[in-house]
Image (spheres, grey):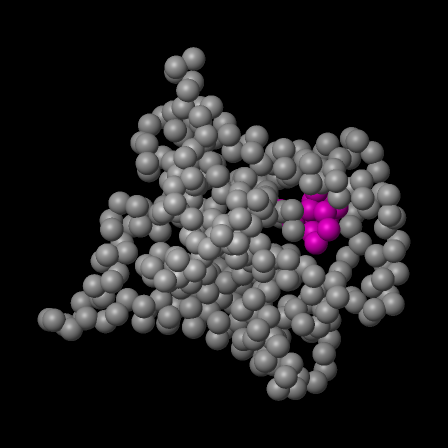
Amino acid sequence: METFKGVFTPPLFLQDPKTDFLIGLRGLFVVQSFLHTFLLVFAPASVVHSTNAQEVLHSSTLHKALKFVSILFWNDGIIYSAFILLSARTICLPFMKEKSKLSIAGSIFRRGIRLWFPVAVALAISTGVLHATGYKYIDDFAEKTGNISILVPYKIDNALIYFNSVFNLFWVTTRFSEQAGSYAFPGQMMWVINVIYMQSFTVYMTMVIGLLLADVTTNMDFKTKAHRGIKVWRSIRCPSYVIYTGILAAGLVMQYLWAAWRPQYRDDELIAHGGLYYTGGLNEDFDAKQPQARDDNYLVLLGFLLWVETSDMVQWALGNRIFVYLGRRSLSKYSQQT
């Protein structure tokens, strides 16, 4: 039994007060997730990438300002990208704390269980509630309110469909959002768990995704070095926060321009990405209706995470009790632990 002790012992790094800011960061995106879902149902025109917002013919100054607020505080692309990036940031920490085969084996063993149970329970509860209340009322509500941004969840009729839906969430390796488990869940965002689970094995086996940020903060004293600034010439140093702010601003400007100025160009940057599964050339065969890996989301999150990793004030703000409480009790608790 001593041999398998590391496999069954849960990691302790998330119980370290020094990592409270990471848990609080999850809590921050939990709040943003709630705002996005709530507003998508009751005020869809205020959600920047919703169908209702895209149908607005006139774009007043107030509406443009609302789009900018939406980009900052309830942006679906940034929210789902954040959970995926946070998973990559934290998943390799147990191995970096204890570099042994048992730490990797324990992470792989626990990951599936910690993800499977909350997903199965959440999908069972949502399916039960929808069966009890009926599905038609969602269509009726959308029609009466003019909400064209929400979809009626896929109906799971029996236990076999339910089992297959949960199973596929841990099996599908492409087109993650096009599966029953995601379509059947309110908000159709369960696919994020699928991506995080598949990402787990990429990190476990190759230690590439998220390793750079985790490694420099854990092993290279990144915070102290960042405070010194970047040497430009002789004794002249550029404050590191200038770089972070530039990266963050670049992402926000891209987001805003494609939301309020030229929305028809929003998906053009996706063509420049390499086709992951079918070609090494331009990504010309993408479905704009599906979630995509976008440069603007990445720049926003990278700039913000660099601020988080190096600023004592930001870490203190994120480490407040409310955000930490929400972060520990969200589904992301299971998707970030290893």
- Residue drawn at 42 percent across, 68 percent down: 248
- Residue drawn at 51 percent across, 54 percent down: 323
Residue 312's quadrant in the figure?
bottom left
Which one is nearer the viewer's eye here, 147 or 328? 328
Which one is nearer the viewer's eye here, 198 or 104? 104
Which one is nearer the viewer's eye here, 288 or 57? 57
Which one is nearer the viewer's eye here, 270 or 159? 159
Q: Residue furthest left?
A: 234
Counting from the top left corner in percent of width and height, residue 195 is at 56, 45
Q: Is residue 277 visible?
A: no
Q: Quarter holding the N terminus?
A: top left
Magenta segment main secondary structure: loop
Q: Is residue 173 visible?
A: yes
Counting from the top left corner in percent of width and height, residue 96 is at 33, 38
Total numbered labels: 0
Segment colored magenta = 176-188
